[in-house]
Structures are given as C-alpha cells and as structure tokens.
Amino acid sequence: PSKCDDKYHSDHTPVVALSTGWYSSGSRCLKNITISAKGRSVDAMVVDECDSSMGCDKKHYYLPPCDNNIVDASQAVWRALGVPLDDWGDMDITWTDA
C-alpha cells in the first residue's frame, strides 16, 4: 500500500511516488504535481515515497535506495505523456506542484 493513504492504487490512475527529498516528509501527500515531457503534461497525485535513504533490507524488499531525483509514475502517467511502452522507465521530465 502507498505511504500517504495506506491504499493500493490502480495503474489506470495517474499517481506517483517521489524520492525522499521531494516527498518532503509527506507534505506533498495526496496533492497533484504537473509532469511534463515530450511536449505534453499530465497532473498526477503523490501517493508514496521512493525512499532515497534506506534500502537493501527486508522492509524495502532488498532493493537499493532510490536516487534523489526520482518521480516513479503509474502506467496512466506514461500513457498520458504519450510515451511508447518500450521507453517506459527512465526519461528526463520536469515537474512542478500543481
């Protein structure tokens, strides 16, 4: 479940997890950000943190910490930005508080 509301969110809903610094101790929880890439923009709700300080333990599924500049987006965000499926994952974007 997401850190902001302890719920699971559909990939059909535009939601994101922000790296620890941008998550800002939850101050952006359930607020929208505007993500821009490839000449398009989409609003997405912040629902989770991509932890930049912890990782590689059981609680974090033994995954390494996120980089400090991550916006981890749902499939709905990728689709709204018109990004081809083969390019989903890692790309340069800009974002602002909506």
Image (cartoon, rainbow, N blue to C red):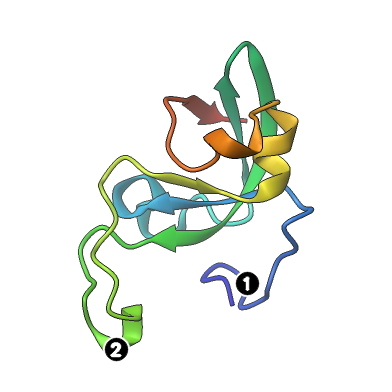
Q: Amino acid at mark 1?
A: Asp
Q: Residue 18 location, x and y as percent?
A: 44, 50
Residue at the image position 63 percent from the left and 55 percent from the top: 30
Residues under numbered marks 2 and 1 in contact, where contact means CB atoms less than 8 Å apart: no
Residue 15, compared with residue 79, is above or below; it is: below
The picture quadrant where one finds residue 66 is bottom left
Q: Can you say which quadrant of the picture contains the C terminus?
A: top right
The picture quadrant where one finds residue 97 is top right
Which residue, as the protein is rendered here, is positioned at the far bottom? Answer: 58
Question: In the image, which is nearer the foreground, mark 2 or mark 1?
Answer: 2
Which residue, as the protein is rendered here, is positioned at the far right? Answer: 12
**Which is nearer the eye, 48 or 81?**
81
Residue at the image position 73 percent from the left and 36 percent from the top: 79
Q: Secondary structure at mark 1?
A: loop
Instruction: Tell me which numbered mark, 2 or 1, is placed earlier along the sequence.
Output: 1
Q: Residue 62 location, x and y as percent?
A: 27, 79
* Horizontal relation, residue 15 to residue 60: left or right: right
The picture quadrant where one finds residue 70 is top left
How crowded pointer 2 is (Cα within 10 Å; few <14, some 14-19, many 20+) is rated as few
Residue 82, compared with residue 17, is above or below; it is: above
Residue at the image position 20 percent from the left and 63 percent from the top: 53
Residue indicated by mark 1: 5
**Number of numbered markers:** 2
Residue at the image position 67 percent from the left and 17 percent from the top: 40
Q: Secondary structure at mark 2?
A: helix
Q: Residue 88 location, x and y as percent?
A: 55, 40
Residue indicated by mark 2: 58
* Horizontal relation, residue 9 to residue 54: left or right: right
